[in-house]
Image (tube, rainbow, N blue to C red):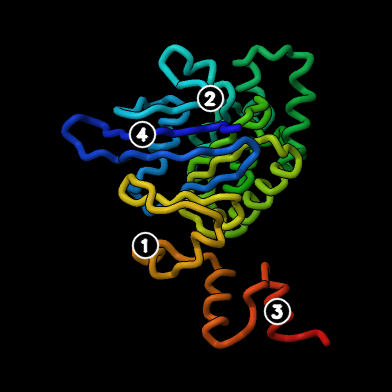
């Protein structure tokens, strides 16, 4: 089943401006984890705002669960979607972590008697159960994003959109969020995740990668296929993920590492234990 489908979407912020999204079409299947990558200005974040109905396309159609997104049903369809922006400070409302997770639940009119269990459950799922009484401003960048994700997940979305959610984090924070995404996939196989990112390491973990260039889909496919061509990536100002870059360089030195899927397997080829 297609959870999200874009058909020939184009968009410009004004009639006199160049289109920032040009004839974009793709499908996101239910339960899949798809990354959209591209350099700054490639149209990634604009696509996220189109999908959740904050912007309306000039041309083309957007479908959520095979239902055409329109001004009449945008509020209904938006309830299926959780969105996490790149700067969690822009999303914080409450004075404490607990208050912040509760905010979305209150808007959905969740009964107060049910709210605490929901808050505790999702705070635990993102590893923030010991921080419920803390002020969000006192948290690290990675912790803030975990709270933002908990707030989004507490609304039980069918689709989670991460709009550059790791771009402001340090390497440890990025690693934490990548681990969290993998945990979410295991805990809820039906959750559809769409990650808008320029982090190729994050995109390498996804099921499918869509590469945007100047508002158009340059190519798409499995991460191993998309990231295997160094020349194409360089032409789009993108880097190879570390493991792909390492495998590429070792292959040029005649090491047999084609079947290696991770660093441990590569290390075994380079330094056999037996």
Q: In this figure, which residue is indicated by the disc labeled 4?
A: 9
Residue toward you, 45 or 147: 45
Residue in the picture at 57% in, 31% down: 3
Quadrant of the image occupied by residue 260: bottom right
State the image coordinates of residue 52 (x, y, percent, origin top left). Answer: 47, 28
Give the residue furthest to the front: 1
Q: Which mark is residue 66?
A: 2
Q: Which mark is residue 237?
A: 1
Instruction: Tell me: 58 left or right of 165.
Output: left
Tell me the mark number nearer the camera, choosing from 3 and 2.
Answer: 2
What residue lies at 22% left-to-right and 30% top-to-bottom?
A: 14
Q: Label 3 to label 1, Cα distance in Å?
A: 29 Å
- Tell me if mark 3 has few (under 14), some (14-19) or many (20+) residues whose alpha carbon lies within 10 angstroms of its own: few
CA distance for labels 3 and 2: 46 Å
Q: Label 1 neighbourhood size at 10 Å, few (<14), some (14-19), many (20+)?
A: few
Question: Which mark is nearer the camera, 4 or 1?
Answer: 4
Q: Secondary structure at mark 4?
A: strand
**Mark 2 or mark 3, which is nearer the start of the sequence?**
2
Position of the N terminus by quadrant: top right
Q: Check disc 3 and report the residue beneath it.
A: 267
Residue 154 higher or lower than 242, as above or below: above
In the rendered image, which quarter contains the C terminus? bottom right
């Amino acid at each position: 089943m297609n959870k999200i489908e874009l058909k020939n979407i184009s968009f410009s912020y004004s009639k006199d401006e160049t289109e920032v999204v040009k004839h974009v079409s793709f499908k996101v299947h239910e339960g899949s984890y798809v990354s959209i990558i591209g350099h700054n200005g490639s149209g990634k974040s604009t696509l996220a705002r189109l999908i959740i109905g904050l912007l309306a396309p000039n041309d083309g159609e957007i479908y959520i669960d095979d239902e055409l997104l329109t001004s009449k049903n945008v509020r209904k369809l938006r309830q299926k979607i959780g969105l996490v922006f790149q700067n969690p400070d822009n999303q914080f409302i409450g004075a404490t972590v607990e208050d912040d997770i509760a905010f979305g639940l209150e808007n959905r009119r969740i009964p107060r008697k049910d709210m605490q269990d929901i808050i505790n459950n999702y705070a635990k799922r993102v590893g923030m159960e010991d921080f419920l009484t803390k002020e969000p401003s006192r948290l690290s960048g990675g912790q803030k994003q975990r709270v933002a994700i908990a707030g989004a997940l507490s609304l039980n979305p069918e689709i989670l959109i991460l709009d550059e959610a790791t771009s402001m984090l340090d390497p440890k924070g990025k690693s934490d969020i990548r681990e969290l995404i993998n945990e979410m996939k295991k805990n809820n196989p039906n959750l559809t995740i769409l990650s808008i990112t320029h982090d190729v390491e994050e995109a390498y973990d996804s099921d499918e990668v869509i590469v945007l260039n100047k508002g158009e889909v340059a190519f798409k496919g499995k991460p191993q296929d998309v990231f295997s061509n160094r020349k194409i990536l360089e032409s789009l100002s993108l880097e190879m993920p570390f493991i792909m870059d390492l495998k590429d360089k070792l292959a040029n030195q005649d090491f047999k590492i084609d079947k290696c899927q991770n660093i441990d397997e590569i290390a075994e080829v380079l330094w056999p234990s037996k």
